[in-house]
Image (cartoon, grey):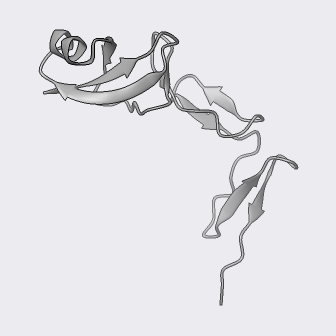
Amino acid sequence: MKKFAVLDSNNEVVNVIIAATKAIAEQITSSYCIEVPNNKIAAIGYTWDETGFIPEKPYESWTLNTGTYLWEAPTPKPNDSNMYEWNEETTSWRQLTRPE
């Protein structure tokens, strides 16, 4: 069985289904479907750009890496054992404090 992304008229993924063939997937859904390669991720809300599936943009300042199809912050996240959250107002990572 294969995984298929069901697309609306704007190429947005509205469902992901499992079917034996594309023809069966399109017959079941009455919609245009794209087979999702095993090494790719497609989920509801993603957009098909004729090459890959783009997740929803998490923040306005982030840019799409067209090689990985992942959104990247303008400032790299620190690579340490601390927890961080993105602050869009300052376009930087804010370290979270752990409860004691």
- Residue that appears at 12% across and 21% down: 20
Which residue is more in the foreground, 12 or 96?
12
- Residue that appears at 83% across and 46% down: 91
Q: Please, is residue 90 above or below residue 80 in the view? A: above
- Residue that appears at 35% across and 20% down: 6
74 sits to left or right of 24: right
Q: Position of residue 98 (x, y in %)?
A: 66, 80
- The N terminus sits in image quarter: top left
Q: Position of residue 58 (x, y in %)?
A: 65, 40
Q: Is residue 36 visible?
A: no
Q: Please, is residue 100 above or below residue 20 in the view? A: below
73 sits to left or right of 44: right
Q: Please, is residue 27 above or below residue 83 in the view? A: above
- Number of on-image labels: 0
Q: Is residue 75 visible?
A: yes
- Residue at the extreme right: 90
4 sits to left or right of 60: left
- Residue that appears at 63% across and 27% down: 64
Q: Position of residue 90 (x, y in %)?
A: 87, 49
Which residue is more in the foreground, 66 or 6?
6
- Residue at the extreme bottom: 100
- The C terminus sits in image quarter: bottom right
Which residue is more in the foreground, 99 or 79?
99
Q: Position of residue 80 (x, y in %)?
A: 63, 65
